[in-house]
Image (tube, grey):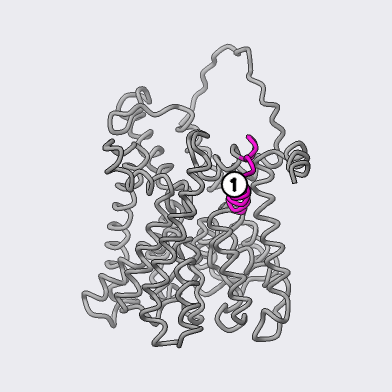
Amino acid sequence: MKNFRDKLYKKFSATQIFVLSFCIIILLGSILLSLPICNDLKPAPYLDNLFTAASATCVTGLVTLTTATQFNMLGQFIIMCLIQVGGLGLMTFIAIFLISINRKLKYQEKLALQGYLNKDDLSNFNHYLIMIYKYTFIIELAGALLLMIRFIPEYGYPRGIFNSIFLSISAFCNAGFDTIGSTSLVIYATDYYINIIIMVLIILGGLGFIVWFEITNLYKTHKSLSLHTRIVLITTLLLIISGTVFFFIFEYDHTLANYSLFDKLFISLFQSITYRTAGFASIDFAASSRVTKLIACFYMFIGGSSGGCAGGIKTTTIVLIIMSIKTLIVNGGKHFHIFKKQIANDLIYRSYVIFSLYLAVIMIDSIILFTSETIETMPLLFEIFSALGTVGLTCSVTTSLSIVGKIVIIFTMLIGRVGPISILLVFSKQNGKDIMYRYPNERVLIG
């Protein structure tokens, strides 16, 4: 075991192993889902099983097969495991296993996990990992037990218990998968009990591990919240409120037309929370207005927060970009700060790089899919944003994608989960040497 780990880290970088771990899980999952014993119906073509495995591992939720009807309970259990592993990361599971058998984590392993979990340093790393698993399984178990109160009377004990566990894990990991049917949670659109549980699980999974620990340890440390946590909480609240307002206004006479005023507000709140990263739907997005689809694309692009199960460029990234623009206008880009805290320039550069790379992926996807598919532009663009943001909402076009379209979406979901920077680092050669010289300054005209 030790020799294998040594050889692995000599041959591959931490980032390459991180990305490779996702690819291995996707391939393994696709093979298992292709087995007849995992299917209620005739096994689907391998590409569809690969698509399902990629979507589950990348906690997205886009599907070309209906999970509730295509796969039996064993197949659904495999999908649930893929969601859990994809949400927390295979490397964290391996790390926990090594810790449990009293093996020390290698420095390279800690570096890889540090990047994945967005931890600032390597101090108390074992404790940090254990706390992540402790909080995750406590929250998922609580969600499952609460859902059982409703699902066991409706589906019976075996199926009711399984549906509750599956939905709780899927919601917390922001995956968007369900074993209810082919219309997501539309049949529970006005079921406040189920929807509130799902919304809480989505928010907790999307806030990020660091935010949990800070909030839960406030009474112990008596310290004020960090800048990261304050940005995450404020931005998340603003996005939820604004998303609710926009959805309510533009869908009032469309998908919400047949609901009462309170139900319209409640459904709008649910969709505002879910369409940033989780992918559950309590209305038919294919029937929504073009404005709603366009606004949803922006929210999917932003996504959730760093260090959690959410996708997108992240809330902190968009805040740094907006505030840097404000600083540029006010004082020419000098003294960039938020809440009286100075922000390092490298974080600003990184934010713009992430933003630019996501736009580049969207542009490349659009060119390929607009060429290969006969689907209308807006639904297809919606699908791209949903895949890249690992959201999982769809305008009912996923099953209509061609072979090329499915392959493109699979790669897009993977890029959205591991991040475009990680993908670039996989193919780059870094020598780790600092440049010991400087070139003369020169200015060019821009804008």
Residue 410, image x, y percentages? 64, 61
Q: In this view, does 336 lie above or below 403?
A: above
**Quadrant of the rendered image containing residue 340:** top left
Does the magenta stretch mainly form a helix, a strand or a loop? helix
Residue 304, image x, y percentages? 42, 52
Q: Residue furthest front?
A: 102
Q: Is residue 165 left or right of residue 248?
A: right
Please state which amino acid type lies under the numbered disc 1. Answer: Ile
The structure residue drawn at horizontal position 64% and vertical position 85%, both measured from the top left corner, is 40
Kindly identify which residue carries mark 1.
Answer: 99
Q: Is residue 167 above or below residue 322?
A: below
Q: Is residue 87 left or right of residue 272?
A: right
Q: Is residue 427 left or right of residue 150?
A: right
Residue 221, image x, y percentages? 30, 37
Magenta region includes residue 96: yes
Q: In this view, does 8 lie to the left or right of 323?
A: right
Residue 402, image x, y percentages? 67, 71
Magenta span of residues: 90-109
Magenta region includes residue 15: no
Name the residue nearer the viewer: 2 or 144: 2
Q: What element carries label 1?
A: helix
The structure residue drawn at horizontal position 52% and vertical position 34%, both measured from the top left corner, is 122
